[in-house]
Image (spheres, helix red, strand yellow):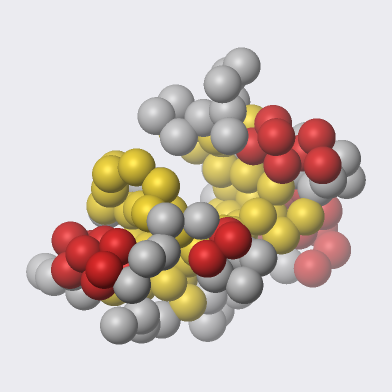
Amino acid sequence: MIGRLNHVAIATSDLKSAAARYSQVLATPEQVSEPAALPDHGVTTVFVNTGNTKLELLEPLGDNSPIWGFLGKNPDGGLHHLCFEVDDIAAAVAKLKAEGARVLGEPKIGAHGLPVVFVHPKDMGGVLIELEEVSKA
Ligand code: CO
């Protein structure tokens, strides 16, 4: 069902310094996006294009951000989720639910303007999984 690894998300309490670290040390400034606020998801994101995939650096946005809980348990930040591409998010959600996996809410428009949904880490080997419906265009 899943296709390409779209991105690996890393939560941080200091997006500016994380982005600077990647643009100056591990990558080049051209590989690192500007910050984008996603109020619907409670995060500000910076993407680092690594060629075969991307890193999504995540910082909490707003008091109700889902990232606060993660940073409470992981104050230095860490691996937050993996995002895989799917062709049909509705079919993916139906299959996951039929197999007993906990799908978190309904699909919403994500950082790339495409529908995304999350699957509970306890049903996925301890890692939060995001599915993104790839553009059919
Ligand atoms: Co993501």
Looking at the rendering, in which quadrant would you find the C terminus? Answer: bottom left
Q: In which quarter of the image is residue 68?
A: top right
58 lies above or below 49: above
**Residue 66 picture location, percent across and down:** 58, 34
Q: Name the residue at 64% across, 37% down.
A: 67
Q: Quadrant of residue 48?
A: bottom right
| Residue found farthest to the left | 137
**Residue 126 picture location, percent across and down:** 65, 65
Can the viewer see residue 114 in this picture? yes
**Residue 51 picture location, percent across and down:** 54, 79
Q: Name the residue at 59% across, 47% down.
A: 46
Q: Quick one: 21 or 111, which is closer to the camera?
A: 111
Q: Is residue 99 left or right of residue 57?
A: left
Q: Quadrant of residue 58?
A: top right
Q: Name the residue at 33% across, 72% down.
A: 99
7 lies above or below 24: below
| Residue found farthest to the right | 76
